[in-house]
Image: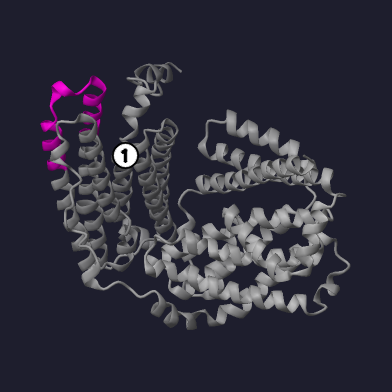
Amino acid sequence: MTILIFLLNLAGATMLLLFAVRMVQTGIERAMGPGFKRIITRHKDSRFRTAMAGILLAVVLQSATASTLLAAGFTASGLLTLAGGLAVVLGADFGSAMVIQVLTFDLRWMIPLLLVSGGYLFLKEPSQTLRQVGRILLGIAFILLALRLIGEAMGPIRDGSFLPAIAGYLQADYVTAFLVGAAITFVMHSSVAAILMFVTFVSLGVLPVIAGVSLILGANLGSALLAIWLSRGMSNKARRVPLGNLFLRGTGAILALILINNSPILSWLSGFESGQILVSVHLTFNIVLLFISLPFVGFLERPLRALLPDPKVSDSPDPLKPISALDDKVINNPQMAIASLTREVLRMSEIVEMMTRPVMELYESGDNERIKVLQLLDKSVNSALSDIRRYAAKIPLDKMSKSQARHVRELTEYSINLEVAGDIVAKKLLHLAKIKAQKRLNFSKAGWNELQDLHERVIANMSVAFNVLLTEDIECARMLMEEKSIMANKERKSRKKHLKRLREGFEDSFESSDIHLETLRALKDLNSQIAAVAYPILYRGGQMLDTRLVENLDEAAE
C-alpha cells in the first residue's frame, strides 16, 4: 500500500511538473508573439552567432525540443542552412541546461510571491501581454512546487527496500540506467522536466550520483529521439536537422557514458552537492558537445541528404492545382454539407497564408518569378469564393435549422473576407515588393524591423484565425480581436516613427517612404480581414456589443 501511495503521489507531482513547464513555454510564446524567426535567423551566416541565438531561444522557450522543431521548420523554408539549423539545436540544448541550473537553486521562498503576483496578473489584468507574464510566473511557481512535492513523495519509502533495490540495480548497470533515462524523457516529452526529476532524486539521496549521471546522459539521448518523433510529419529537408542532432547528441552521450563510468572524472566534483554534480555534468556535456561539434556540422550535410533525399519534382503536388473540398454528394445533408463548406474555407485560408508567408523575403530578394507564381494563386482564391457561393446556395433551406443557415452565411461572409485578403497580398504587397526591387530601394533598419514585426504578427494571427474557424473557441476569438487592436496601435506608432525619421533626414526612409507607408496600411488591412472570423463567435457568446456609439459618446462627454 505504501508503494501504491508513493507511485500515485509521484505521478501527480510529475504531471504538475510537466504542466508547469508547458505553462511557462506557452506564456513566453504568446507574450513574445512570432518574433522567434528573427531571433534565429538574424545572424544566419555565422555558426557561432546562430548557436548563441539557439541558446537564447531555449532560455525563452524553456524547451530544447521546441527550439529544434523551430530550427527544422526554418531550415525547410530556406531561412537557415542545414549547418545553421544544427548550430541552433546545439546552442538550444546548452541553453536548456542553463535553465535547469537556475531551476535547481533553492527558490522555495519564492513560491508564495510568484503565486500571488502571477495569479493577480493572469486573472485581473486586461492586457494580453501582462496576462502571459502572469502565466509565466505561475508556471515557475508550479515547477518549484512540483519539485517540492516530488521530494515529499519520497519520504514514506526512502528507508524501505523498494527504492534501494532499484537504485542499486541502476548503479550496477549503467547501460540500463542510460536507457531508462532516455525512455522516461521520451515518455514525459520534456527533457527539462525529466532532468529536474532526476536531480531531485539524487539530491534526496534516493539515487546514487553515478546512477543519476547515467540517467542524465540518457535524457540527452531521449530528447534527441523525441525531436525525431515529433518531426516525423515534416518534409525530408526539415527532418535532417533532428536526425543530425540525434547523431551528434547520441554519439556524444554514449561516449560520455562510457568515459564517466570507467574513469575517476566524478571524483573531481566531489566537493559539490550531489544534485549539483548532475547539473554540472549536464552543463559540461552540452557545452563540450557544442564547441566540438560546431566546426564540423557542415560535413553532415551530404550524408543527411543521402539518408533523407529531396522529393523528385514529379512527386511534388502542383500548388496551383485546385483540389476542392466541396462534395456535391452530401448537399442534401446540411450537417455534412457545412463540414464540406468549412473544409473549403479552410483550404482557401491556407492558400492566402501560402501567399502571405514569403512576402518579407520577397521584399528583400525581389524574386520576380516567385512573385508571379504567388500572384497566380489569387486566381485559386477567387475560384474558391465562387465555388463556395454556389455551393452555399445549393444547400436546401428547408432542411437547415436556423443555426445551420446562420453558420452557412457566416462561412460565406468569411470567404469574402479571405478573397479581399488575397487581393491585398497579390495586388498590393507583392506589387510593392516588385516596385521596391525595380527601383532598388532600401528601408531604414528601424523601419524594416517594424515591417517584419507586423508581418510576423499577421502570420501568427492567421494560425489563430484558422483555429477559431474550426473550433469556434471564444478565448481564441478574443485573443484575435485583442491582436487586431495591437496591430492597429503598432501600425500607427510605426507611421509616426517613420515620419519622425523623415523629419530627421534619414535618406533611406525618404526614398522608400511611399512603399513603407503603403505596406503598413496593407498589413493592417490584411490582418483585419483575417480577424473577421472572430466577430460572429464573439457576438453569439455575448462578448461584443452591436455598436460602440455609447462608448464613443461617453468619451466625447469626458
Relative height, residue 144 to residue 113 (above, below): below
Question: On the rendered structure, is 389 left or right of 157?
Answer: left
Choose between 145 and 330: the one closer to the eye: 330
Query: Does the rendering let one see residue 372?
Result: yes
**Residue at 16% over, 53% down:** 322
Residue beneath label 1, please?
528
Give the residues drawn in magenta, as a range.
385-413
Q: Secondary structure at mark 1?
A: helix
Q: Is residue 79 visible?
A: no
- Left or right of 343? Residue 293 is right
Q: On the rendered structure, is 369 left or right of 279?
A: left
Residue, x 64% and y 56% (percent of image)? 192
Instruction: Reply yes or no: does residue 217 show up in magenta.
Output: no
**Residue 6 on image: x %, y %:** 75, 43
Q: Residues within 10 Å of mark 1 (few under 14, many from 20)?
A: many
Instruction: Give the camera-side residue of 548 and 44.
Output: 44
Between 76 and 488, the residue placed more toward the observer is 76
Q: Is residue 387 magenta?
A: yes
